[in-house]
Amino acid sequence: MTCRTERSPCPRPERWVLCYLREASIRFHQSGGAVTGPIRLTVGSDNPNAPATYEMSGGSLDMQGCTVTDNGILTISHASSDIRFSSFFNIATGGRLHAVPGATIHLLETAWFNHSSQPQLMENMRHVTFVYEGSPGFFQAAGRDLGPHITGFTSNFAQGGIQVGSDAQTAVLALQDHLDNVPDDPNPEVVYVKHLILSPGSKLYLQGLTVYCYRFTDNGGTVIANGGQLIQVPVLPGDSNGDDAVNVLDIAPFVQSSSTPTPTPPRTPRRPAGHERPRPRRRC
């Protein structure tokens, strides 16, 4: 395994490359601390049969850019991991993103190029909230257009959340469809996201594309359609835990929400003995 820093002959930032040059796979595990600096991270291997993995279960990772190659895997195994990329975030055709529910990736003035045409390798995107900060930011629409239906959120590059801007910084995000993520469909790709959030003063340019979402929270931002459309999708009935399926895993959240005690209104106190209200006499 080599985990090296390469200097370019031109005056460019350093590039940190995680790769494996022999016949076995390698996993770089960051469980704490901070990895930061004006460098670019490439997760991949020179051997197509030996993938390289960068796993985060804690700590912070702040890079000027990140590329996950055809046999690279970026894994977020704990939601507390603080991940921030600026400038660019590239996922190659065979790159993979694994993540637990509640994971977050911050993208500062970042262009995200998703080259993948294999949504099963990116299925865990539905667990991740992508927070865009600064401007401009660009995002590649990659999903097949299955309409405003629950099926569009499964194996279709769906995302857990897209947040345009934050409490500290506004953002401008523009969608784009420059890559062919669905080769057998001539129609434009779309975006499926569970929760779309617009922070105060932030802007989302749809650029003629379609965004399907379960929830839309507008805290004072602006959606500029430019021929596109934002469509809310009805939530699947009975899906208590929000995993896009109705099964035994929905029982516990349903019971918990149903078992919350309802406060009973206070009763009027009874009058003490000897102070009863006199009853009116009946007239014959």
Image: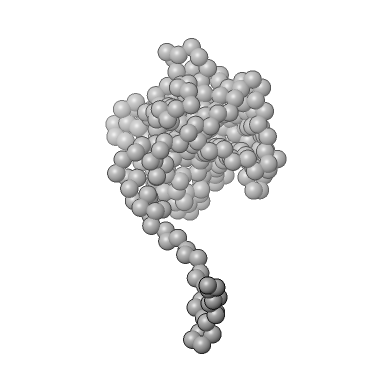
Q: Residue at 49% across / 17% down in the picture?
A: 180
Q: Position of residue 24 (x, y in %)?
A: 29, 34
Instruction: From the viewer's perspective, tell me whether residue 198 is left or right of residue 183.
Output: right
* Image position, residue 215 (x, y; %): 53, 38
* Residue 208: quadrant of the picture: top right
Residue 252 vs 222, above or below: the answer is below
Q: Residue 237, can we see it? A: yes
The spot of residue 244 in percent (x, y) is 39, 36
| Residue for point 40% across, 38% down | 237
The x and y percentages for residue 227 are: 64, 20
**Viewport quadrant of the N terminus:** top left
Nearer to the camera, 35 or 126: 126
**Residue 261 or 39: which is nearer the viewer?**
261
48, above or below 265, in the image = above
Up the image or down, 168 lies above or below 47; here it is below
Q: How many marks?
A: 0
Q: Where, by quadrant of the figure, is residue 205 drawn?
A: top right
Extreme residue toward the bottom, this view: 274
Q: How is the image coloured?
A: one colour
**In the image as oriented, which residue stretches furthest toward the front?**
284
Report whether 146 appears left or right of 215: left
Whether residue 2 appears in this view of the structure is no
Front residue of this view, candidates 95 and 184:
184
Taking the spot 49% from the left edge, 31% from the top edge, the residue there is 233
